[in-house]
Amino acid sequence: MRFTEINLFGVYVAPISVMMIAAWVVTIAVRRFAARCGLLQRVWHPAVFVFSVYIIVLSSIVLTAAR
């Protein structure tokens, strides 16, 4: 797949920006689930943990789209 610009209501945006927004939405859901289960209280640095989850989700989306 070629990463070409996406026409979003007449504005061309880079595909990575759409992927970043999708990863952000997924990360919010994962963060809420982790907070509900008490996982965020058990990690050393919750902000670094959430950022790491975001990077993992974003890279998974990019690798899936590249196939």
Image (spheres, rainbow, N blue to C red):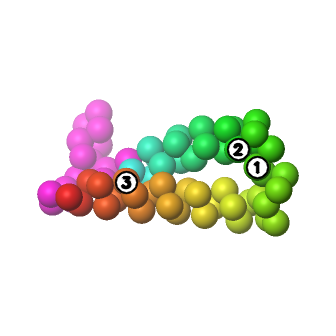
The residue at the point 80 percent across, 44 percent down is 38
Q: Which residue is mark 3?
A: 61
Q: Which residue is mark 2?
A: 34
Tag 1 near tag 2, CB within 8 Å: yes
Dot 2 alpha-carbon crowd within 10 angstroms: few under 14, some 14 to 19, many 20 or more: some
**Could you say which is closer to the camera, residue 48 or residue 21?**
48
Q: Is residue 66 left or right of residue 22?
A: left
Magenta extent: 1-18
The answer to whether the residues at label 3 and label 2 have Cβ atoms under 8 Å apart is no
Determine the residue positioned at 53% across, 41% down: 25
Tell me if I can see residue 18 in this picture: yes
Q: Is residue 16 magenta?
A: yes
- Tell me the distance, in whole angstroms, between the alpha carbons under discs 3 and 2: 20 Å
- Dot 1 or dot 2, earlier in sequence: 2
The x and y percentages for residue 50 are: 66, 56
Amino acid type for the residue under numbered disc 1: Leu
User: What residue occupies the far right of the structure in this picture?
Assistant: 41
**Which one is earlier in the sequence, the residue at label 3 or at label 2?**
2
Per the image, label 2 sits on a secondary structure element best described as helix
Residue closest to the far left: 1
- How far, Cα to Cα, is label 1 from label 2? 5 Å
Q: At 82% across and 56% down in the image, what residue appears?
A: 42
Q: Nearer the viewer, residue 6 or 49?
A: 49
Q: Are marks 1 and 3 in contact (CB under 8 Å)?
A: no
Q: Foreground mark, 1 or 3?
A: 1
Q: Position of residue 35 (x, y in %)?
A: 76, 42
Q: Which circle's residue, 1 or 3, is located before the other in the chain? A: 1
The alpha-carbon separation of the residues under discs 1 and 3 comes to 24 Å
Instruction: Name the residue tied to disc 1.
Output: 39
Which of label 3 and label 2 is nearer to you? 2
Amino acid type for the residue under numbered disc 2: Ala
Relative to 49, residue 33 above or below: above
